[in-house]
Amino acid sequence: MKHLIDIKDLSVEEIDKMIEVAKDIIANKEKYSHKCDGKLLATLFFEPSTRTRLSFEAAMLRLGGEVLGFSEASSSSVSKGETVADTIRTVGCYADIIAMRHPKEGAPLVASEKSTVPIINAGDGGHNHPTQTLTDLLTIKCEKGRLNDLTIGLCGDLKFGRTVHSLISAMSRYKNIKFVLISPKELVIPEYIKKEVLDKNNIEYIETNDIEEHMSELDILYMTRVQKERFFNEEDYIRLKDYYILNKEKLEKAKKDLCVMHPLPRVNEISTDVDDDPRACYFKQAQYGMFIRMSLIMKMLGVE
């Protein structure tokens, strides 16, 4: 594999293999501690990030490699007018692999067309976030033991939520998956996701604005924040930001083995009183992200 821009760049077999390698890393960390000795990862983050950037860096360091890069566009030559293409060409002279986040949809794809080293899309605007999806799949597999036969609730910002879009694309390739799409009318799932993924693959789904209506049916509840940075109108953001707040009371009707997930950062959409509930998986999810990125880096560098 040359680049990872979209989760659809990976076959189901490739995803399943990466998950198995990640599970082996979890069980045998020392075995992998020198797999990427002498390799360099560049993290080019033109948009702020904590978990994604640090988990990429931690992943490479735990594999024995090294890291260089920047955490915001203002600290790069882009602030001087340099194009993304030129930045990528230059960084490719120094690094063996690049993880890139950018606020503009399609920027990592453009970068991949100019790059001489593998590019990993670490998030592009409201479009794709394939490594978060791999994180989510590893979390589901470890916590539920399967990726088939699941009812998945997706709640919050389904319009701009790139993690949601990528997860729907990935899970739609597994058997007997049903989605409950929970959002206010202003933040419903885009039509192209419904037509090109859900309807095309005959995936059963329900759209609702009530988080409690189908709670008892869910195996997974995936919460998302309303993203201020995607709004042009601050009044709309203020009106919608606290539309859903998951608390212990709302979980009373949920299954005992429900898995509550969140790509983080959390704002108000999950009350802190949920944190100690055994069904809360979002901090474990962040840790799983490092392990799956270790597996991905090895795959893209051709490391056995």
Image (cartoon, rainbow, N blue to C red):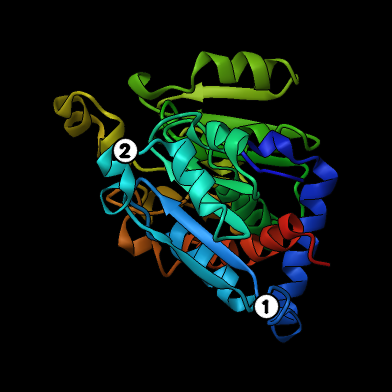
Taking 85 as reference, is 170 left or right? right
The residue under the point 75% across, 41% down is 10
Q: Quadrant of the C terminus?
A: bottom right
The residue under the point 59% across, 17% down is 194
Work out whether residue 50 or residue 214 is closer to the camera in this orientation and state it: 50
Which mark, by number, is residue 86? none
Label 1 Cα neighbours within 10 Å, binned few <14 / some 14-19 / many ≥20: some
Label 2 Cα neighbours within 10 Å, binned few <14 / some 14-19 / many ≥20: some
The amino acid sitting under disc 2 is Gln
Kind of element beneath mark 1:
loop
Q: Which residue is mark 1?
A: 37
Residue 285 image position (x, y, % from top left): 54, 61
Work out whether residue 1 or residue 14 is closer to the camera in this orientation and state it: 1
Residue 103 image position (x, y, % from top left): 38, 36
Q: Is residue 203 visible?
A: yes
Residue 17 image position (x, y, % from top left): 82, 56
Q: Which residue is mark 2?
A: 227
Query: For residue 96, which quarter of the picture?
Result: bottom right
Tell me: residue 282, above or below residue 245.
below
Between disc 1 and disc 2, whose residue precedes? 1
1 vs 2, front mark? 1
Kind of element beneath mark 2:
loop
